[in-house]
Amino acid sequence: MNVAIIGTGLIGGSMALALKELGIAKKIIGVDASEDHRKKAVDLGLVDETRELADAIIASELVIVAIPVHAAEKLLPAVMDQVTTQVVMDVSSTKETIIKSIAAHPKRKRFVATHPMWGTEYSGPEAAVRDAFKGKVTVISGKEDCDPDAVSLVEDIYGKLGMKLIYMDPESHDLHAAYVSHISHITSFALANTVLEKEKEEDTIFAMASAGFESTVRLAKSNPDMWVQIFLQNRENILDVLNEHITQLRKFKSCLEKENETYLTELIVNANKIRKILK
Amino acid sequence: MNVAIIGTGLIGGSMALALKELGIAKKIIGVDASEDHRKKAVDLGLVDETRELADAIIASELVIVAIPVHAAEKLLPAVMDQVTTQVVMDVSSTKETIIKSIAAHPKRKRFVATHPMWGTEYSGPEAAVRDAFKGKVTVISGKEDCDPDAVSLVEDIYGKLGMKLIYMDPESHDLHAAYVSHISHITSFALANTVLEKEKEEDTIFAMASAGFESTVRLAKSNPDMWVQIFLQNRENILDVLNEHITQLRKFKSCLEKENETYLTELIVNANKIRKILK
């Protein structure tokens, strides 16, 4: 099977590596608006060749749209216009708007919306990672609106990548993603800004910062272009979580102001319940 | 050299392992208020034997106080009362109040205040880790108030553990610790509470939560008894950071409410500067 990958960055590049190594793709054709990325994707061996969009789609049986979600939803109708029997899937971080972008398209049923729950704070072709997806979860969204053979192909591929599949309507996906992914990025960005604002002695941060700090602030290195669009796309859900998060932080603030040891303990004991959920 | 370790938990236990393996300690004598911890510390091979406090001090040349900081500052005067020529060091997360607790003690100069910048979200003897400290940083605070031989011994030990030493007055230590350690714990606890409050479908969190979420929320598993006291001890510095952090989160909130893409991008680009500081 030939596979066209539109967007040869972190996710597209990592997927290209996996599809080739597992023998799922015979040929990977990269499509990328950036000449630099096209060159790197070939040089790094992520793709076999690069082509213009229309050529790549014609030459492929599967098209993977792996560009940031705001660009993906703009491009997707044009991709679907070129589709005859191909299957098209996306890997974006929000699902509601991208599905809406082709909801009325005559080729709608050839499109399968997916979200593999993996990423790092890095981006671009150099960020691509081998064995990235194994053991992780992929959400498939709006399966009932797709051709069964299209869903089967996508399920089969994610299965071969070693991923666990869960199914969710796009609204539920976006709500849960706000809680388990998007808010973490906001808190990391805000924490980085907090420390950068208050802590002028950079050497001191560098010297004293231990694993705990690095772990909470790691996501603050993430790509602005990608995350600005995710935040705007999913703004209502994220605002809802963010308001709750600010409320929770104020409870800690109030405990500290009043030196209320009992309530502070309760807050932390409650937070410890996350243990039940995360191993 | 015989070493008494008061508190055979995460830090004390890990230090016991290192001191024994590196041949720094001939015998490790554990002191712990908890019978269960005393038994585990012996069973796990963290300490050679356990004794009552006074006996342990008499039999040792170095005493390491590795109990939570509020307990440490209550116990420390009694420890110093027993000291003849021993060196006493602590490993607590705040430095101002513990140093004050023995500032006027006749044996003050035998005490060296330290903070090895390492920890995990686990606690107790079972949480002790081999090679925990290698490559990490230790802060030594108030060195000028100690006997030179006491400081030399402590510096020598941390050097053998493979740690980098930095020196800081207690006030500066506590301020910087609020920024690079304590606030990360508050944001993690609050994030856990946020998600637990809003997200009732625990299976969904479990399934969808990826490495990013786990990384920002990992510290929320940390021990309440320890962290309540650290937060209360360092409350003024932490309140200062926490207020700044809430301000920073509100900037994100305002951007989302107004769909202000330009300012949202600026906030994230600024947060990316943390890259310069953390590798």
Image (cartoon, coloured by chain):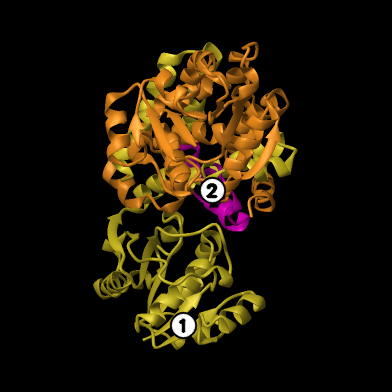
Chain colours: A yellow, B orange
Q: Are marks 1 and 2 in contact (CB under 8 Å)?
A: no
Q: Residue at x 50, y 59 (%)?
A: A120
Give whichever of B32, A136 is nearer the camera.
Answer: B32
Q: CA distance from mark 1 to mark 2?
A: 30 Å
Residue A236 magenta:
yes
Which percent across, then down, holds residue B73? 52, 17
Q: Secondary structure at mark 2?
A: helix
Residue B115 magenta:
no
Q: Residue at x 58, y 76 (%)?
A: A32
Of badges 1 and 2, the one in the foreground is 2
Is residue A155 visible to us here? yes
Badge number at residue A57: 1
- On the image, numbered disc 2 is attached to which residue? A231
Q: Is residue B90 left or right of residue B34?
A: right
Compared to residue A235, the image places residue B55 above or below, namely above
Which percent across, then down, holds residue A202? 72, 43
Subunit of label 2 = A
Give the residue type that dot 2 points to: Phe
Q: Which residues are magenta?
A: A213-242
Q: Is residue B166 left or right of residue A114?
A: right
Of label 1 and label 2, which has the lower sequence position?
Answer: 1
Which percent across, then down, holds residue B85? 58, 23
Q: Quadrant of the N terminus of chain A?
A: bottom left
